[in-house]
């Protein structure tokens, strides 16, 4: 197995901010040991409440008599090879693992001596919580306080079924965020046609332990948040104890229907009936096998005396593990924390909110951030993990299409940059209070107005998955067609050359009220050209013929790419003039105009001013794609250095929140592009890799190809390309071509 495998702590943690991740399937745990107790947060994909906050499913505290973890031989270990966390000390070992294929958390305790064991389910949502702090609203889709109260409603938690049952069911007796958004954005006429993921969404679970009984039901406080605990405990000292927690998320017409789904979790049912867990060993083996094949798909191992350089490959693996914990989630891994957020006071000491908090919302997705989480999965060979992000857009297609009909009476789907999980813009960013006569389909927002082109990056991912993995593109064609058709319908005016007049548009969030935005032109050019090859149709040729050229300019005598032909103002900190380099791949190594793209990187004032590595910054990717090895290496070292928390890849908050997943994703892409770049069938090895960094790696390339190489002193000394027929397409320094 190609993983460096293990992270070990030999001291307990001070608080949840020093937790380590554990997970699988679509479940994430933050695990830590504090004052002798083993604690972990429970998170799962899809836990959106009435306000569209993404709520945690609670916290579990496991306590073993005799304080074994206070001993000098304490260890907490993350085992990447099977996805587990093992805590040991004082003759006691606890293994935590999550079933990759069933939403069940397993806690297995073994002790040399008989011990008493308790597990307490802790909930801070044991009573309604009225949100009174405007900053706290950033965790939900209202974003700011409203004229009406915003309440996080209490969960139902009780002893039952020989354990603890807990759930949150979204209420339907009051207007929720979906209802409010539809009303305030003028979409009420089609409300009954809109996809609604909020209504009756129900999430929770059951915690049981073989032979355990109900114990205390006590109040307490952790960090800034009061909680109530429901304890189960052993009736006598034991040498071994199994605890299972089944988690269920579903939209159901009735609570009873949701309960039946929870009851159907076989491993929990077996434990509840005080029998040996049926199939638990088989499920553990199946999960182990999944993790083993996951790590064998790809790897990057750097051999260098500099620990900062070696940290790149270690942190690359750790972050890839975080992404894999939501491999099969119905909902995408969120850029602003994924499944691994923790008490906000340990991110920012001024934020005294519950563990449910994350800045930039729960059900609100931001395309420019999300794309960076998902692009690296292609070269990692993790195509199966793209489904959650793709399905997110497919589910919203109808709603985005209705926006176009309601506001402009034309076809095509209008996807906004910052979008709710039901396909409408965030209501606060939309700004319902606006001057009379304002276009109702446009967000009245300085950053987000007219920024509709970012959806094309997910069209590109769909096309890339087809090219990389050979999957069918058929189910995605209507989606891509609708995204393109929107621009054709909305901007169906032409200049004297017969080119679209893309005005007003936007170049990311930065160049506003643009005329012929480079990001729009580059996106449509790339998608249309790709569609011509995989799904030929005359309309693609017609649209391509109407596209204006990417605008070029000059700065201090150097030809550069412009962000647009004209623009009204600069609003944000992105560098969209380099988007034709990444993600669109129009400029790059082996392609015409490389010098123009390098000039843009080096001389464009915005590019120079915004050069950085923090958060979603993409300069390591730009540098790698342009063959600027020194910059790519410097930026990757900065990107991959340990974050501010005990777990090395809990980066952030950057521009967003902790753990910052678009920080990690952009870092991964940069290193991948340093090692391997592709241009249709061409494969360039080491296009921006420092000669002094010896490395062995396995990455994926288009046409179901894998490339394994060993590099020493800047030379490829071993190369295996699968299938072998693709080796002729590989270009590398000591073979010639770069």
Image: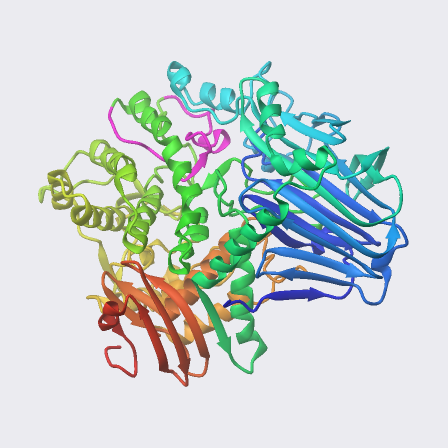
Identify the image quadrant of residue 247. Answer: top right
From the viewer's perspective, tell me whether residue 299 is left or right of residue 200: left
Residue that appears at 51% across and 52% down: 324
686 vs 425, nearest the viewer = 686
Instruction: Assess whether residue 39 is covered by the magenta stretch.
Output: no
From the viewer's perspective, tell me whether residue 661 is left or right of residue 353: left
Q: What range is drawn magenta here? A: 410-436
From the viewer's perspective, tell me whether residue 684 is left or right of residue 383: left
211 vs 41, nearest the viewer = 211
Vertical position of residue 556 compared to residue 476: above or below:
below
Residue that appears at 45% across and 48% down: 369
Q: Position of residue 422 (x, y in %)?
A: 44, 29
Q: Is residue 492 visible?
A: yes
301 vs 175, nearest the viewer = 301
Identify the image quadrant of residue 262. Answer: top right
Could you tell me how many numbered marks the image carries?
A: 0
- Magenta portion: prevailing SS class: loop
Q: Position of residue 394 (x, y in %)?
A: 36, 34
Identify the image quadrant of residue 356. Answer: top right
Residue that appears at 79% across and 39% down: 120
Q: Is residue 56 visible?
A: no
From the viewer's perspective, tell me whether residue 321 is left or right of residue 644: left
Q: Position of residue 511 (x, y in %)?
A: 35, 48
Instruction: Assess whether residue 413 is covered by the magenta stretch.
Output: yes
Pick the quarter of the image with the C terminus: bottom left
Vertical position of residue 183 compared to residue 131: above or below:
above
């Amino acid at each position: 197995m190609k993983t460096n495998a293990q992270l070990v702590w030999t001291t307990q943690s001070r608080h949840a901010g020093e937790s380590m991740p554990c997970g699988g399937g679509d479940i994430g745990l933050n695990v830590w040991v504090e004052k002798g107790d083993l604690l972990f947060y429970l998170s799962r994909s899809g836990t959106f409440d009435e306000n569209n906050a993404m709520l945690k499913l609670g916290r579990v505290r496991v306590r073993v008599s005799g304080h074994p973890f206070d001993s000098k031989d304490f260890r907490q270990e993350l085992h990447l090879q099977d996805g587990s966390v093992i805590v040991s000390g004082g003759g006691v070992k606890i293994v935590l693992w999550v079933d990759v294929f069933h939403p069940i958390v397993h806690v297995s305790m073994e002790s040399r001596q008989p011990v008493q064991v308790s597990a307490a389910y802790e909930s801070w949502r044991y009573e309604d919580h009225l949100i009174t702090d405007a900053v706290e609203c950033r965790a939900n889709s209202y974003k700011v306080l409203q004229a009406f109260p915003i309440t996080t409603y209490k969960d139902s938690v009780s002893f039952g079924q020989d354990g603890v049952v807990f759930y949150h069911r979204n209420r339907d007796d009051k207007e929720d965020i979906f209802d409010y958004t539809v009303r305030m954005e003028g979409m009420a006429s089609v409300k009954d046609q809109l996809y609604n993921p909020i209504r009756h969404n129900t999430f929770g679970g059951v915690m049981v332990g073989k032979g355990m009984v109900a114990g205390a039901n006590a109040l307490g406080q952790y960090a800034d948040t009061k909680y109530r605990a429901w304890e189960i405990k052993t009736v006598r000292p034991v040498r071994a104890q199994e605890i299972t927690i089944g988690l269920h998320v579903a939209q159901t017409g009735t609570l009873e229907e949701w309960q039946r789904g929870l009851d159907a979790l076989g491993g929990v049912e077996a434990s509840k009936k005080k029998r040996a867990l049926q199939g638990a060993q088989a499920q553990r083996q199946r999960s182990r096998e999944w993790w083993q094949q996951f790590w064998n798909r790809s790897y990057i191992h750097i051999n260098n005396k500099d620990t900062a350089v070696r940290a790149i490959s270690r942190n690359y693996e750790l972050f890839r593990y975080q992404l894999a914990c939501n491999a099969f989630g119905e909902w995408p891994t969120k850029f602003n924390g994924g499944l691994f957020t923790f008490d906000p006071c340990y991110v920012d000491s001024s934020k005294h909110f519950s563990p449910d908090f994350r800045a930039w919302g729960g059900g609100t997705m931001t395309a420019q951030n999300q794309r960076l989480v998902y692009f690296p999965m292609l070269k990692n060979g993790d195509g199966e993990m793209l489904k959650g992000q793709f399905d997110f857009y497919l589910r919203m297609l109808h709603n985005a299409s209705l926006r176009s009909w309601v506001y402009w009476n034309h076809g095509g789907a209008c996807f906004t940059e910052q979008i709710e999980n039901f396909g409408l813009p965030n209501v606060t960013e939309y700004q319902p209070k606006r001057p009379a006569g304002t276009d109702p389909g446009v967000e009245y927002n300085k950053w987000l107005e007219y920024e509709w082109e970012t959806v094309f990056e997910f069209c590109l991912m769909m096309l890339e998955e087809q090219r990389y993995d050979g999957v069918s593109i058929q189910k995605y064609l209507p989606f891509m067609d609708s995204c393109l058709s929107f621009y054709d319908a909305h901007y169906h005016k032409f200049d004297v050359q017969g080119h679209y007049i893309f005005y007003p548009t936007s170049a990311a969030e930065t160049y506003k009220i643009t005329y012929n935005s480079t990001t729009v032109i580059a996106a449509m050019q790339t998608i249309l050209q790709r569609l011509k090859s995989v799904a030929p149709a005359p309309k693609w040729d017609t649209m391509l013929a109407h596209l204006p050229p990417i605008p070029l300019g000059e700065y201090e005598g150097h030809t550069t790419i412009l962000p647009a032909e004209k623009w009204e103002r600069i609003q944000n900190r992105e560098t969209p003039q380099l988007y034709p380099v990444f993600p669109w791949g129009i400029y790059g190594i082996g392609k015409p105009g490389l010098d123009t793209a390098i000039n843009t990187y080096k001389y464009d004032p915005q590019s120079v001013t915004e050069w950085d590595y923090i958060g979603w910054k993409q300069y390591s990717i730009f540098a790698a794609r342009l063959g600027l090895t020194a910059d790519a290496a410097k930026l990757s070292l900065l990107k991959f250095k340990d974050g501010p928390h005990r777990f090395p890849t809990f980066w952030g908050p950057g521009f967003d929140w902790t753990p910052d997943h678009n920080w990690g994703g952009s870092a991964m892409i940069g290193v991948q592009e340093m090692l391997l770049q592709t241009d249709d069938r061409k494969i360039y090895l080491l296009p921006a890799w420092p000669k002094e960094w010896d490395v062995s790696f396995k990455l994926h390339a288009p046409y179901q190809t894998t490339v394994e190489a060993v590099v020493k002193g800047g030379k490829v000394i071993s190369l295996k390309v699968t299938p072998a027929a693709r080796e002729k397409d590989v270009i590398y320094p000591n073979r010639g071509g770069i």
